[in-house]
Image: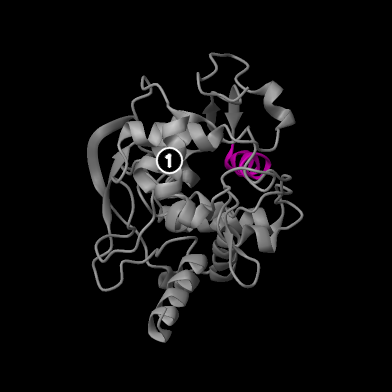
Amino acid sequence: MSKLSGRVAGAVIAALVAAGCGSPEPVGRAAAQYDLVLVDDANRRIGTYTIPQDTAIVDEPNAEQIFYGKRLLNETERLLPDHVGAAMNCNSCHIAQGKIPLGDPYINSFNFYPRVMPRAGREIDLEARINGCFQRSMNGKPLDRESEEMKAMIAYMEWLSQNTPRDQLVDIANAGTVDASLVPDPVRGERIYHAQCAACHGDNGEGLRDSRGDIVFPPLWGDESFNIGAGLARTYKAAAFVKYNMPMGIQTVGLWGHGNVLSDQDAVDVAEFFTHKPRPDFPGKVNDWPNGPKPKDARY
């Protein structure tokens, strides 16, 4: 590798780490806009939402808190080691700091909760949803609901909502869909994994850390990965994330070079392969879907 290409590669990796594996800002281009809709009338356009630039945070009265929340979401494992048991950050799954459609954006999170969730079988608020991620996707421990860390992460999500009224949502898809009637082929999925995924996530699903030991690309199985209670441990849910967000790339158009490389069948096959690899257990699984029915791809 030449010195120039080495420096460029290093800069790219640094940018990916800082942004949670993807550039959050469309440099030199107009920011992406989405319709605002009424919660009870999703077909009625009532306004426009524009993804904010992070430089605008400095104008907020609680700018320090918002920036801290942004850092916590990007550097969760490093900043909250007592609460993270996996080699994961929140933004390992919430693409480009929660700003990308189909990449689990945070844009509606502040207004979406509280609501009844099927897995819990009861109403949960945003604090409970965040702690669920810590216990499942992070294979860790919940935060104190009143902690400055919890309040900071929620402050970032509230800022990202850009004062959208409580009875409205931004018309941005949280996740894509795949054909759940497809029968997965994990043998074929293993071939796809090594061709499309292993360069970032490792031949053995171990992920990739930088020279400081901070996680760049998360492990997809093993002791440092998400546990079986996480949504991404389910075949079809993982397949939808993979299809629309992976394999990751760098491009000059849009906010994220991602998706539309794999077919539904490709995504289902590779998801079946890595979701069924060994990973930590989740004791709280006994309380999931108390009112049924349990999804067919649940790991337990």
Is the residue 202 above or below the residue 128 in the image?
below
Q: Colour scheme in the image?
A: one colour
Look at the image and say whether residue 241 sits in the magenta stretch. Answer: no
- Locate residue 62 relative to residue 279 in the image: left or right: left
Whether residue 126 is visible, yes or no, is yes
Quadrant of the rendering where the C terminus is positioned: top right
Q: What residue type is labelled 1?
A: Arg
> Which of the 4 image quadrants contains residue 39?
top left
* Residue at image coords 58%, 50%: 219
Instruction: Name the residue rendered at 33%, 26% in the picture.
Output: 179
Q: Which secondary structure lies at badge 1? A: helix
Left or right, 299 with respect to 52, comes to right
- On whether residue 136 falls in the magenta region, the answer is yes
Asked whether, in this view, residue 298 is left or right of residue 7, the answer is right
Secondary structure mostly seen in the magenta stretch:
helix
Q: Position of residue 203 (x, y in %)?
A: 54, 50
Residue 209 x, y percent position in the rendering: 60, 63
The image shows residue 177 at horizontal and vertical percentages of 35, 32
Q: Mark 1 points at which residue?
A: 191
Residue placed most toward the observer, 52 or 77: 77
Q: Residue reaching furthest right?
A: 82
Residue 84 in the image: above or below residue 180: below
Question: What is the magenta range?
Answer: 125-137
The N terminus, quarter of image:
bottom left
Tell how many labels: 1
